[in-house]
Image (cartoon, helix red, strand yellow):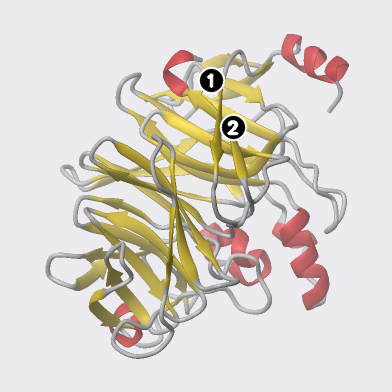
Amino acid sequence: MNRGSIYFCAVLSLLFVACSGKKQVHSLEELPSYDSLSVSIDYPILSNYVILQPYVRGNEYCLVGGNSFIHSLDFVNLSGGDHISIELEQEGPNGVLKNFNFCQSGDKLVCRDEGGIVVLDTMGKVHQRLPMKDLLSPDGKYRIRAKGLTFGNFQTTFSSVGDEVFIPMFPAQKDGDVKIGKVYNVSNNAVEELPISYPEEMKNHMDLLAGLAMPQITAYEDRILCSFPASSSCFLYDRKSGETKRFELNSCSVPNTIDAEKIEGMDLKRKFTNEVTSHRFSAVYYCADTRSYYRVHYGPKESMKDKNRSIYLMVCDEDAENVREYILPSHFSEQYVVMGSQILFLCKGSNDMELRFAKIDVRKI
């Protein structure tokens, strides 16, 4: 999007109806401010990770990258100090299978690989396991990936609060009530279903949407948030009241749903291309300091080889009102991590000896 288009969209206010039914002015603006951060690395790591997650230890803030080439976890210390790479074993009591994703829980990392859930420390030692059959129980109700070729198999990130790790899953059936996934309790090495039902509109089209129908789960206090890449909607579950509320976090930059019917009839290759190039929405987060929600979303790409994609950030209050939507600078990459009220975007041009980040504080925009 060129500068003229940005300013045109900024003055062109759009009206939308939030979940409360009130009308609010909603406009697209340029990001007003962000900080830059550069981290020098004294050993070669990847400047592009399929999975990039935060890791906080005391006053140290790290990013952890899952390095699929050498099967390692790379810790990048953002607070200064050593950067380390922990090579993982693939077999034996400390084995972690090749395809995995992970998140932090306390001082441990909780991984899910093809064998199930693996809890390990930052030295790569496995402390406990939960077999895949227990994660998928009951048989025939859940699966860990969409059918067919999809970018969503292992790129969906986990999230955690305390000892609880939220694991998104796909329904294996279209009939009956199926939840959006499981919650794994690290302390007792057990799982149970999450209370939010997989929406019918996603269930009816999940084979067409593939990875775009994978749940995205975050949590705060006594509430669980769920969203989907294929829709701007968000589902909020209150653990105290047992109620689920739906928000329509509408965008003025991209369509608010992905039309699944246009995908029908595509062969597997075209479906995969559509999934990779389509616009999509990321997970919804909550900032306790400002009592606001925020979410990153992406514009479409022209082709599989296209490395340029418009990136946007939406911020709104607890009632999905007072929406502010920003277009992010073109040097921001698609990879980002959230640390409380901070969003860190890996910048284009980073290399294996220096990583450059843009840091957005949602309290200041």
SS for dot 1: loop
Q: Which mark is residue 128?
A: none
In this view, the residue in front, 43 or 169, is 43
Identify the residue position indicated by label 2 in the image.
250
Q: Which residue is farthest front?
A: 42
Tag 1: Cα neighbours inside 10 Å, few (<14), some, or many (≥20)? Answer: many
Tag 2: Cα neighbours inside 10 Å, few (<14), some, or many (≥20)? Answer: many
Q: What separation in Å lies between label 2 and label 1 (alpha carbons)?
A: 9 Å
In this view, the residue in front, 99 or 177, is 99
Q: Residue at x 39, y 84 (%)?
A: 115
Q: Position of residue 68 (x, y in %)?
A: 57, 70
Q: Residue at x 47, y 20 (%)?
A: 321
Identify the residue position indicated by label 1 in the image.
323
User: Which amino acid type is marked by label 2?
Assistant: Asn
User: Which amino acid type is marked by label 1?
Assistant: Val
Question: In the image, 122: left or right of 8?
Answer: left
When the figure is inspected, residue 89 is found, relative to residue 263, above or below; the finding is: below
When the figure is inspected, residue 360 is found, relative to residue 282, above or below; the finding is: above
When the figure is inspected, residue 42 is found, relative to residue 37, above or below; the finding is: below
Q: Position of residue 182 (x, y in %)?
A: 31, 66
Q: Are marks 2 and 1 in contact (CB under 8 Å)?
A: yes
SS for dot 2: loop
Q: Is residue 61 visible?
A: yes
When the figure is inspected, residue 172 is found, relative to residue 4, above or below; the finding is: below
The quadrant where residue 84 appears: bottom left
Q: Position of residue 73 (x, y in %)?
A: 45, 63
Q: Which residue is farthest bottom?
A: 92
In this view, the residue in front, 108 or 14, is 108
The quadrant where residue 69 appears: bottom right
